[in-house]
Image (cartoon, helix red, strand yellow):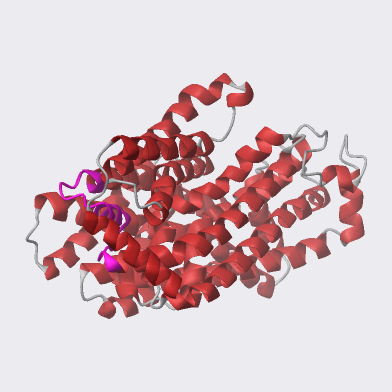
Amino acid sequence: MRLTMMIFAILVYLGYMVYLGISMSKKNKSADDMYLGGRKLGPYVTAMSAEASDMSSWLLMGLPGVALINGIMAPGGFAEAVWTAIGLAAGTYINWLIVAKRIRIYSAKTSSTTIPSFLSNRFGDKAGFLTAVAAVVIIVFFIPYTASGFSAIGKLASSLFNVDYHATMIIGAIILVAYTVSGGFLAASVTDFIQSIVMTIALFVVVFYGIENAGGMSEIENNILAIPGIDSLGQYFSLTGTDGSYGFLPIVSTLAWGLGYFGMPHILLRFMAIEDEKKLKVSRRVASVWVTVSMAIAIFIGVLGYSFVINSGEIFNDGFDSERIVIYFADAISRLDSFGAIIAGVIIAGILASIMSTADSQLLAASSSVSENLIKRFVWKDIGEKMQMWLARITVTVIAIVAIVLAWNQDSSVFRIVSFAWAGFGAAFGPIILFALFWKRTNKWGALAGVISGGATVFIWKYLVRPIGGVLDIYELLPAFIISAIAIVVVSLLTTAPEKEIVDTFDEVTAQVKAK
């Protein structure tokens, strides 16, 4: 009965997602609608869909897990979770503040519906080199990213209900593809908005239950003080780690997560799709508050998780996985009564929501790179509008199949892929997006150098430089971002200045931004 009620709550949620996708399908009249929703998003959907598509399962699994296990086992573990959250919160706010309005106006001015097309149109790349490179970068980083989401769905269902990993992964992928293919960008955005609400409910339910189950705040405090090597709460919650070893370099490296926001295609597309750039101020406030509060709650769940595990009598046994702490909470709640089982189902739906809200956006971004920026641009230039829609849907399906194949190994790491892909997008696109919007002297060769050097440095630093250790053991996003920025400036200055038409468009956009 308990499992039946949980499954019922989950199926209601999944069924509603598919219904929304089908209901949105009639609004897709062109490929532009499929990939950008006709620039019709309201401020709240823009805000919440952007952040839900950003957070992924990292919010309900990764971050609480880091706060829980590292806060106990590693001297700088809790500090790592907090500084990561601070970097992401700051990056969220700054991205909305300085990038959102400019890229909305600029993309509309240049009739751009994807990030590769925006870069190409912004820099007058008639040959399409920049489009092709940007599209390949998106495919390289997004398909494995999408695969990690499919893998997370399979692992979640198989661990909860003891069912086959591959079967549940495929079913989850089919549901996700169903509403994405039918409803496109608009469906993905609206469902992401709903999913952000489900994620929020899940966070608060776990916190309320966790405090009660842990015996109250005083008992939580006592359990923390009983951790070997912890003499005070101030030491445990120290932003420099329990032994003060979490210094300047680790802090800067961790804060660098925030730089990734400037280059995230699925977030930038939300900026481009809002119906009225004047409403972005509302979106910025909603998004910034939600991100900050949700990450703070996620970290607190990690703190609560320690007392929860102690009370369960299964502290850190061989089968314990800190990233599944929210699932452990849900399982305990489901054992209370039938209502508890439904609430547990909502919590699991929240985890599914965090996974699916990211995967659908990644799927659309990757498919648009293939169909719009590669096939239509270089192979089938005279494709009709109707066939273009079918091409878009077929591409989504094919990319999903490739992602399923990549996720077939259930022992693959989900969160390691997320961290690497975040660095890849942040370094390849972050600097050039900022230079495209704020430095008129940037040219297409500088842009090309920035995208290539940023993406390549992520690979080089991750696999060749960082293993050396010492001062070089920093998150690859930071050095790659810096190298990309340097490459943009140096190559732009060493090559021909942009044409007058491109500079005039830049000045018009700048004037329009200031006027609004």
Where the C terminus falls, by quadrant? Answer: bottom left
Depicted 257 relative to depicted 390: above or below: above
Residue, far left: 382
Image coords of residue 491 (percent x, y): 33, 36
Asked if one can make out residue 51 in the rendered structure from this viewpoint, the answer is no
Query: Which residue is at 34% across, 38% downward?
Result: 493
Asked if one can make out residue 362 in the rendered structure from this viewpoint, the answer is yes
Image coords of residue 293 (percent x, y): 67, 64
Give 242 or 162, whichever is nearer the viewer: 242
Residue 117 within the magenta-colored segment of the rendering: yes
Image coords of residue 80 (percent x, y): 69, 42
Query: Which residue is at 57% across, 43% downward?
Result: 256
Highlighted magenta segment, given as a residue range: 109-131
Number of numbered markers: 0
Residue 208 within the magenta-colored segment of the rendering: no
Query: Which residue is at 44% across, 70% downward?
Result: 514
Give 12 or 82, whichever is nearer the viewer: 82
Q: Is residue 313 left or right of residue 364?
A: right
Query: Which residue is at 13% across, 49% downward?
Result: 378
Depicted 337 relative to depicted 129: above or below: below
Where the N terminus falls, by quadrant? Answer: bottom right
The image quadrant of residue 455 is top left
Image coords of residue 407 (percent x, y): 40, 43
